[in-house]
Every structure is written in structure tokens, then in C-alpha cells.
Image (cartoon, grey):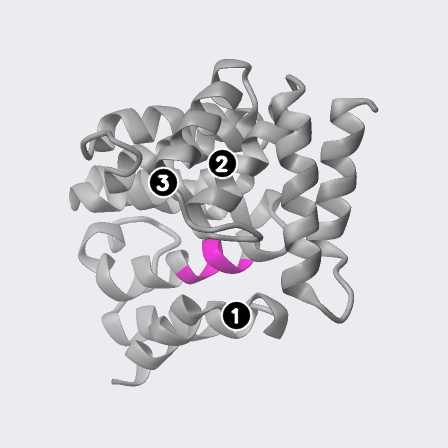
């Protein structure tokens, strides 16, 4: 059959699973792999994602890197993002390279990957400077505007993180809260906007920090 069609069917299985989530994700992975090996970059990006995180298959960073590179070389946004994740963490036989990771995340973001937009902000926050913190906040706000599902929740949580931990960098902005107490309240307000279905462990971690 058509490789792209197989990949799209795998995508449907991955998200619209029935009673047996693990079994459906294993089947989804088999379709992604068949599509990727048939030359489809969308499928290759999904193989990379599944292999990196262990969804529907065993976790395998080397395999994740291989398929991410293949997909990224064909301008697939998920492949670009996953290749960036490999460089960010130093997985798949490569050393940690934050600059290379950021370039890949920016490319994926420009191609419409909102999770990559969140990653752009995360990379900039790692630099821990005022200029980079402001730019990071811009990426998180962009992902909130454009994102859906988990990318919205993650972007909102990271934006709350900025108000909690990067207030000194942001306080000069016209729209910024006027005190640390206001910044904390802003963070809590943002976190409460996140739907229950998008509340990851990181969301609860930041929410807990607001009251610590």
C-alpha cells in the first residue's frame, strides 16, 4: 500500500486507541515503521519519536537518531524536532550540542511543529540571561497561541516557570507583573488555565512550587 497512508493509519491508531493502549501503540508503530522503510518521511519521524520514548516499541536511542535524521533530511518537522532532542540530551551516539538542538527546533517550529516551539524556549532558558529569557517567553506565548493538546499545556507551564524563576529578567517589560508576589499569582493563573487532560507531571511540579 501507500507508505504515507500507512503512516496516517498508524497516527490514527496512536491517538484513538481502544481498551488496550499498549497493543494499539504497538500496531501503530508497525505501520510507522513500514511507512518509513517504504520511504515516507512522516512515518520516519514517528518511528524516531516512538523509539526515543519507548511508545509501542522498546526504547532505542540509536534507532531514534537514525530515523530522525532520515526524516529531518526530508524536511519533516517531527524528524527535525526529534533530532534536536537527540542533540539536546546527547542520545543516539552524539554529544550534547545545545546550539545544534536549538537550530533544529527552530526549523521544526517554522515548519509548524508547536512542541518544537516549546523546545526553542527551553533551550533559550538554559542560557539563563535576560535577553534569552525574554526570547524564550516569546516562544512559549507563540506555542500557546498556535498549539493544541499537550503543546499548549507544556507552553503554559513553561511560561509560568518564567514568571516564577526568571522574574528578574522579565520585570522591565511593560506587561510584566510589578512584584514577585504578582508574578507568582500570574503563574498560578496560567497553570489553572491548563485543561486536566494536558496536565503533565511538569505542570503539577510547577504548581507545587508556587505554594512552596
Q: Nearer the viewer, mark 2 or mark 1?
A: 2
* Disc 1 from disc 3: Cα separation: 26 Å
Residue at x 56%, y 56% (from the top left corner): 150
Mark 3 or 2, nearer chain start: 2
Q: Check disc 2 and report its element: helix, strand or loop.
A: helix
Indicate the position of residue 172 as horizontal and vertical percent values. 25, 50
Q: Is residue 9 visible?
A: yes
User: In the rendered view, would you say 73 is above or below 6?
Assistant: above
Q: Is residue 186 visible?
A: no
Indicate the position of residue 87 as horizontal and vertical percent values. 28, 33
Q: Could you say which disc has been placed on residue 61 in the image?
A: 3
The residue labelled by disc 1 is 199
Question: Residue 136: which quarter of the image?
Answer: top left
Q: Nearer the viewer, mark 1 or mark 3?
A: 3
* Disc 2 from disc 1: Cα separation: 24 Å
Residue nearest the observer in this picture, 209 or 102: 102
Q: Check disc 1 and report its element: helix, strand or loop.
A: loop
Magenta span: 153-157
Q: Classify 10 Å Cα crowding around label 3: few (below 14), some (14-19), many (20 and above).
A: many
Judged by its main secondary structure, the magenta piece is helix
Amino acid at each position: 500500500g501507500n507508505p504515507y497512508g500507512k503512516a496516517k493509519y498508524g497516527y490514527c491508531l496512536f491517538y484513538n486507541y481502544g481498551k488496550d493502549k499498549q497493543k494499539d501503540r504497538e500496531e501503530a508503530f508497525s505501520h510507522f515503521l513500514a511507512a518509513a522503510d517504504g520511504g515516507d518521511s512522516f512515518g520516519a519521524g514517528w518511528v524516531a519519536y516512538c523509539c526515543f520514548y519507548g511508545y509501542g516499541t522498546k526504547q532505542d536511542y540509536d534507532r531514534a537518531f537514525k530515523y530522525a535524521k532520515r526524516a529531518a533530511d526530508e524536511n519533516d518537522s517531527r524528524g527535525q524536532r526529534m533530532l534536536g532532542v537527540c542533540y539536546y540530551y546527547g542520545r543516539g551516539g552524539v554529544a550534547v550540542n545545545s546550539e545544534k538542538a536549538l537550530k533544529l527546533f527552530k526549523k521544526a517550529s517554522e515548519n509548524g511543529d508547536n512542541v518544537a516551539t516549546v523546545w526553542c524556549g527551553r533551550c533559550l532558558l538554559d542560557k539563563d540571561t535576560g535577553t534569552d529569557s525574554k526570547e524564550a517567553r516569546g516562544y512559549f506565548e507563540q506555542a500557546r497561541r498556535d498549539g493544541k493538546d499537550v503543546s499548549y499545556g507544556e507552553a503554559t507551564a513553561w511560561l509560568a516557570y518564567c514568571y516564577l524563576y526568571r522574574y528578574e529578567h522579565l520585570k522591565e517589560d511593560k506587561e510584566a507583573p510589578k512584584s514577585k508576589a504578582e508574578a507568582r499569582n500570574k503563574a498560578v493563573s496560567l497553570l489553572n488555565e491548563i485543561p486536566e487532560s494536558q496536565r503533565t507531571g511538569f505542570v503539577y511540579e510547577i504548581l507545587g512550587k508556587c505554594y512552596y
